[in-house]
Image (cartoon, rainbow, N blue to C red):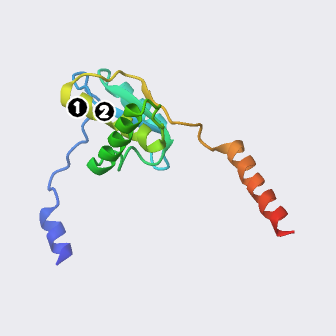
Amino acid sequence: LDWMVAMVTWPAYARPVPPVGDASLEPVIIGNLHDPRTAYANAQELRQAFPEGYLVTWQGYGHGLKDSHTSQQGASILREYEKSRAENKLPEYTNAVAKYACISKVFHYLDTGEGIRDGHTCLLPEALNLGSARAVSKARELITWFSQRK
């Protein structure tokens, strides 16, 4: 039955894929420097295809900025920020805050058409633990673990 449905609904005529890019569109393209699924170079190429678009760079891990603008998480981040301000303290800049700030900037632009610029980079609170820095960190953990077993 599945095969019959597929045959009946299959397009009868080939449709060419439209060219990528349109000089009149202003998309927001979010490129992630450490995305395991999509290379950052793809975001840069896409930006070139849309000359009026905006490239926003997220420095963190993961695929895009998913799960970063839920109302519950946003409300919690906002409460912590307002509490810190009321106590005249500098709010803690965490990875969650960085993600929330980045996606909030994108949503604000989509709602109002204002507030974003091409090339904006959403900064992380600290350097990522990658490459040789990660190897050194893991080596220290192993040394500590072995020394505690003696």
Q: Amino acid at mark 2?
A: Val
Q: Residue at x 33, y 49 (%)?
A: 73
Residue at the extreme bottom: 1
Measured along the vertical axis of the image, is residue 10 above or below residue 133? Answer: below
Q: Is residue 28 left or right of residue 136?
A: left
Element under disc 1: helix
**Residue 84 percent across, percent down from the top left:** 41, 36
Q: CA distance from mark 1 to mark 2?
A: 6 Å
**Residue 106 percent across, percent down from the top left:** 30, 33
**Which circle marks residue 4 in the picture?**
none
In front: 99, or 77? 77
In front: 104, or 79? 79
Q: Is residue 23 left or right of residue 92?
A: left
**Residue 20 percent across, percent down from the top left:** 30, 33
**Residue 116 percent across, percent down from the top left:** 32, 24
Which corner quadrant of the image does residue 32 belong to?
A: top left
Question: Is residue 46 at all visible to an observer of this figure?
Answer: yes
Question: Is residue 20 at all visible to an observer of this figure?
Answer: no
Q: Residue at x 68, y 47 (%)?
A: 134
Q: Amino acid at mark 1?
A: Leu
**Mark 1 — residue?**
110
Quadrant where the image shows the N terminus: bottom left
Q: Residue at x 48, y 41 (%)?
A: 94
Instruction: Categorize mark 1 by other alpha carbons within 10 Å: few (<14), some (14-19), many (20+).
Output: some
Q: Residue at x 20, y 73 (%)?
A: 3
**Mark 2 — residue?**
106
Element under disc 2: helix
Measured along the vertical axis of the image, is residue 146 above or below residue 106? Answer: below
